[in-house]
Amino acid sequence: MLEVAKVTKNDIVYDLGCGDGRIVVTAAKKFGCKAYGFDVDPKRIKESLDNVKKNRVEQLVTIKQQDIFTLDLSKASVVTLYLLPSLNVKLIPQLKKLKPGSRIVSHDFDMAGVEPDEGFPITMKSNGIEHMIYRWTAPIKVKKEE
Ligand SMILES: C[S@@+](CC[C@H](N)C(=O)[O-])C[C@H]1O[C@@H](n2cnc3c(N)ncnc32)[C@H](O)[C@@H]1O
């Protein structure tokens, strides 16, 4: 996902629903950029904080327990999503406010009503299972209802 977003060290990555923090930790370790992970679940927050500590990326990664629908995304240049399709759609009003050129990448799920730049399958090396990856670039273009 981070490669599809063409992340560089100058990016600021927001993972909305960060789970165990694997995306924000990878962003910091592999690309050297700042990354913020948000989750509502205290267990996931603890896992993320442990992951950050284990990988010694405290200087670059911030983990916050917060409902993603209350977030101001104006500082993000890359947003990563692995959420249910209905949640992707619910995020549209916030994603519309991203700076031009910011990238949104979603694992497995599209965003109804917003045409991606691209959407393609990838096969996991570990188990051969196929997953979809979608990418959008801000400003996102929301299709008018017919
Ligand atoms: C499928 S996991 C994705 C984890 C991580 N982004 C990844 O790709 O490995 C989805 C996460 O979203 C979190 N989540 C769901 N709704 C949320 C909300 N409204 N605010 C914050 N986190 C939320 C869940 O607690 C869960 O940890």
Image (tube, rainbow, N blue to C red):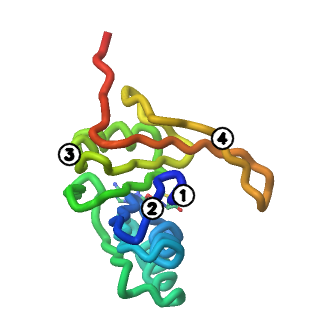
Is residue 21 visible to us here?
no
Q: Exactly how many numbered labels are in the figure?
A: 4
Q: Position of residue 45 (x, y in %)?
A: 41, 75
* Image quadrant containing the C terminus: top left
Query: What's the CA distance linking mark 3 and mark 2?
Result: 20 Å
CB within 8 Å, label 2 to label 4? no
Which tag, 2 or 4, sits closer to the chain's start? Answer: 2
Query: What's the CA distance linking mark 2 and mark 4?
Result: 20 Å
Is residue 62 visible to us here?
yes
Residue position for label 1: 3
Residue sitting at x 37%, y 26%: 113
Give the side of residue 80 with respect to residue 109, left or right. Answer: left
Residue position for label 3: 97
Residue position for label 2: 7
Tag 1 secondary structure: loop
Residue position for label 4: 121
User: Where ligand 1 lies, by image quadrant?
Assistant: bottom left
Residue sitting at x 38%, y 58%: 16
CB within 8 Å, label 1 to label 2? yes
Density class for disc 1 (Cα within 10 Å; few <14, some 14-19, many ≥20) is few
Density class for disc 4 (Cα within 10 Å; few <14, some 14-19, many ≥20) is few
Query: What's the CA distance linking mark 4 and mark 1?
Result: 14 Å
